[in-house]
Amino acid sequence: MSDISGDHLRAQMRGAVTTLDRVHHILAAQLEADFCLPAGAISQAQNLGAEVLSALQLPAEEMSASRRRNADTWELRVGNYLGVGLLCAKYHRVLKTATEYMRGDLSNWLGDYAPLRQLNELLTPYSQQVSGTSVYYTPSRNLLESVVPPDIPEQEVKCAVPGIGMMRRVDSGALRESLRQHICGLHKVTTVPNASADALEADEDDTAVSEFSVRIELLHPEQYERFRGDPRYSNALGFSDRRPDIMVLAAFDSDADLALAEPLAMAGASDDSPLMRQIGIDVLPQVRQRGLAAHLVYELSRMVLADGYVPFYGTSPSHVLSQRVALAAGFIPTWWEFISTSMHDMPLDEAS
């Protein structure tokens, strides 16, 4: 949290992220680091119409320092970014098998059950298993354009980095303080009915616009430390040494004593890499479906972008409610990914 309250020199040097060109540049650099690909490989693949990029996993000490700070226990990582299949494997035979399987348009459909099951069967002779799949969201143009409030002077300048185009230059300290003042304090969160509500035979109570007042606060580490180990906020707060919590927004009852009150909802940003921050959100059951999740994710993401980082939101391909939160908060689906690990690492039931 010290990044927020004190040292904004680094954010001033980075500059706020406010354009899609810059997001794409950062995201390509991130995925190249995560998949052990050379710099510029993704842009070149898109320009040449390449379908698959593959690489052997580097030893941990040789991996890029920009990679996401997950545990480096995976043996195969597969992804799809803007139609380009991405592969990185620990062993050459596994990489060759997976690359041959991914030829053509298959990387766009690999998340379907049948091709994913077939890939898992191809991995079985190598004692590997699919360990998890995720779909990741990054900011849309509308979210990016909302980062700089109207009261902050800005200047459109040409970015020095090739391929980025124009960017908006603002004073970092003024931007951060303005956002804090806009975001924190008493707010009314409004829930609007589905656009198709008029065509549905629904009760007026189910389709009416609703709103309620909350107090939103930016929490410091000593304020959220009391929630360590609390499963109600396990998505927002990780308390991880590898990926520490950097920024936390919480919503309280409008008249609550903040020192004692339980947050109605909490959104956290973790330091997942030198380039990106991962967003997590938790909402207490009694106030769900009222727009709190999307509101907090949206506001927290604006603050992350102001600091010069790209926020990303990951969820399960089957978690539709979570995906709806991402969309409502101004995010768009950007890449899909799964990893495999050794079957020898499978936890076994001691009773068996």
Image: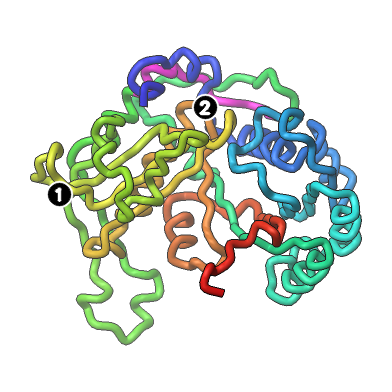
Q: Answer whether residue 82 is visible to the viewer in this image.
A: no
Query: What's the residue at 53%, 21% (across, down)?
Result: 15
Asked if residue 174 lies in the magenta stretch, the reply is: yes
Residue 318, given in percent of the width and then of the height, sits at 54, 69
Label 2: state its secondary structure: loop
Which residues, given as a range, are shown in magenta?
Answer: 164-176
The amino acid on which the numbered mark 1 sits, given as a three-letter code, is Asp
Query: What's the residue at 24%, 34% (across, down)?
Result: 223
75 or 298: nearer the viewer: 75
Task: Determine the image quadrant of residue 343.
Answer: bottom right
Query: What's the residue at 49%, 44% (across, down)?
Result: 142
Structural distance between the alpha carbons of marks 2 and 1: 31 Å
Query: What's the residue at 74%, 42% (across, down)?
Result: 35
| 203 left or right, relative to 296 | left
Q: How many marks?
A: 2
> Does 45 appear above or below 155?
below
Q: Answer whether residue 254 is visible to the viewer in this image.
A: yes
Asked if residue 271 lies in the magenta stretch, the reply is: no
Q: Which residue is mark 1?
A: 253
Residue 312, given in percent of the width and then of the height, sits at 53, 44
Residue 87, given in percent of the width and then of the height, sits at 79, 50
| 286 left or right, relative to 173 | left
> Does 165 appear above or below 334?
above
> Does 64 appear above or below 34?
above
Q: Which residue is mark 2?
A: 308
